[in-house]
Image (cartoon, rainbow, N blue to C red):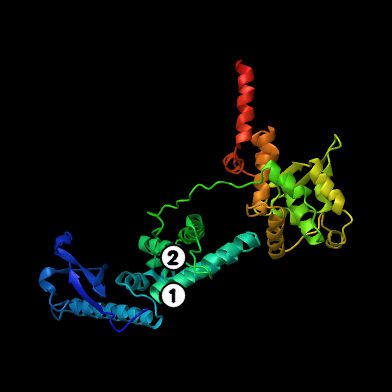
Amino acid sequence: MNTPQNTFGMFFFIRKNRKDKEGKAPIYVRITVNGKRSDMALKQNISEINWNAKRGIAKGTKPEIVKLNNYLEEFRSGIVATYQELVLQKTLITAELVKNKFIGGDKQEFTILKLIELHNQEEGSILVWGTMKNYYTTQKYLKKFLKEKYGTNDKYLSELNYKFIMDFDFFLRRLKNKQGKIALQNNGVMKHLERFFKMINLSLKHEWIEKDPFHAYKLKFEKTEREFLTKQELKRLEEHTFTRSSLQTVRDLFVFSCYTGLAYIDVFNLLPSNVVNIEDGELWIKTSRQKTSTPVTVPLLPKAIDIIEKYKEHPKALSEGKLLPTYSNQKLNSYLKEIATACEITKPLTFHIARHTFATTITLTNGVPIESISKMLGHTKLSTTQIYAKVVESKLGSDMASLRKILG
């Protein structure tokens, strides 16, 4: 935010070492704000003998000299007006910003918040709500950062540089939650910067900025262990008796995900028509992942079929036309915490863990090829599946036992 200590100045000068073939030197303007300067060429040349270096104007009364001085005065007035406009906008002013706003036209009028609004308009109809919700959180943090760091509500895209990105990184790492503890770990910070990076890429494609402020910044995600339920934990979950029907239903939905690999939003969207009979009489689920629109085909295992049969006459499922009864995310997460406690499972129960359980405990450790697992999970890259499908010790042990038989 601007303060009374702001200093602003400008003057015209010539570069004697850049004379043209006629011996004329180019005229430049130097803008200075708070001791930092930015130079700009005026595309006007003049003989050194006709230049008053002390006053920063051309010498003489010839018509061309008068015309040049009038031009310089208009130029000066335009830069002063630009500076005063920025003062009224209460933005953090730099010499570079004054120059860019003066010469940039509409391109320099784009700000961070305008970029975010455009991104949300363009992507809002494509991305799922869960993903857009994350972008809204990044937007909230950017606004908070601008207010705390710069005392302003917005910034021009032309102001963004490597230091801005590093300052935002540092800001995110110091964020505290309601309990006064650090709110974001490294990968959480990286996710917000990754989303901001994608928005900056949008501005580069539209040519609203010339330089990428992320050019020298590298996103550094830390490798994390993908948690999943062991065979014993899954059995304990399946066999537990719940007195409340809501907990029982959510448990069944979670188990269904463990045996199909479907994300909750895809379980939520399932219709009876998504269950199809293949020629050999086996039941399969055919659907598309909401997150990526990737087609998914999953042969139904007996446990998953049992759950479908259990709820095919459920009033909630019938009234909504769904394959299974469903709950809102808020209720679902609350119930999963209760279920974890009741089953003495210390891992945070989420549908991500259910997908990981399908990829490891259900399929990979039972010898299903990773290529098949990748297709059932709806991944477009095998490398993504390799992250999900952690090879557990029991699988390694069985592989080595098979190898010993082959070798011995």
Q: Nearer the viewer, residue 44 or 54?
A: 54
Q: Secondary structure at mark 2?
A: loop
At which x and y percent is residue 119? 55, 64
**Disc 2 designates what residue?**
174
Task: Give the residue at mark 1.
Answer: 147
Residue in view at x 61 percent, y 22 percent: 403
Secondary structure beneath dot 1 equals helix
Q: In the picture provided, is 76 more to the left or to the right than 240? A: left
* Real-space CA distance between mark 2 and mark 1, rounded to the nearest whole angstrom: 15 Å
**Lower position in the chain sequence, tag 2 or tag 1:** 1
The one nearer the camera, 137 or 65, is: 137
Report the amino acid beneath label 1: Lys
Q: How many marks?
A: 2
Disc sitting over residue 118 in the figure = none
Q: Residues within 10 Å of mark 1 (few under 14, many from 20)?
A: some
Can residue 260 be seen by looking at this rendering?
no
Query: Which quadrant of the rendered structure holds the N terminus?
Result: bottom left
Residue at the image point whose x is 47% and y is 56% from the top: 186
Mark 2 is on which residue type? Arg
Where does the image place residue 79, in percent across and percent down from the top left?
A: 31, 77
